[in-house]
Image (cartoon, helix red, strand yellow):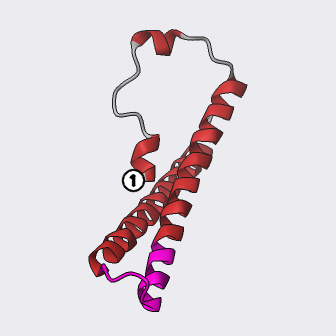
Amino acid sequence: MSNPIINTIPLSQPSQTQWEKNISPGEAHATFANQLKDAVAGVNKAQILSNEKTKALARGDINDLHDVMISSQKASITMKTTVEMQSKVVEAYKEIMRMQV
């Protein structure tokens, strides 16, 4: 299972031609919003999967404790990463708002 946060971040830098494209602010906003929604959906999916595996272990449907713990840790790490990213974005926004123009 792959990390939903990591999968939404491109692993390589965009080529020069990608930067030269004329993208309207509306398109940039829509693209960013879609990527953000996908990232949050991935975090939610990891949380749900962890919850389902924990319940299945408690019911005795599965016996693989290691898989349940790994799933739980993945969900925890993706949530912590998301919260940290959110706080950094809010901090950057506040810093921009304090700037004098």
In the image, taking residue 69 as reference, residue 53 lies left or right, namely: right
Q: Residue at x 51, y 10 (%)?
A: 20
Quarter of the picture containing the N terminus is bottom left
Q: Which quarter of the picture shows residue 67?
A: bottom left
Q: Give 60 or 83, whichever is nearer the viewer.
A: 60
Q: Is residue 50 above or below residue 91?
A: below
The magenta-colored residue range is: 50-64
In the image, taking residue 15 as reference, residue 92 lies left or right, namely: right
Q: Is residue 87 above or below residue 16?
A: below
In the image, taking residue 77 as reference, residue 52 lies left or right, namely: right
Magenta stretch prevailing secondary structure: helix
- Label 1 belongs to which residue? 3
Is residue 54 in view from this perspective?
yes
* Amino acid marked by disc 1: Asn
Q: Residue at x 42, y 89 (%)?
A: 60
Is residue 99 in view from this perspective?
no
Q: Residue at x 41, y 11 (%)?
A: 16
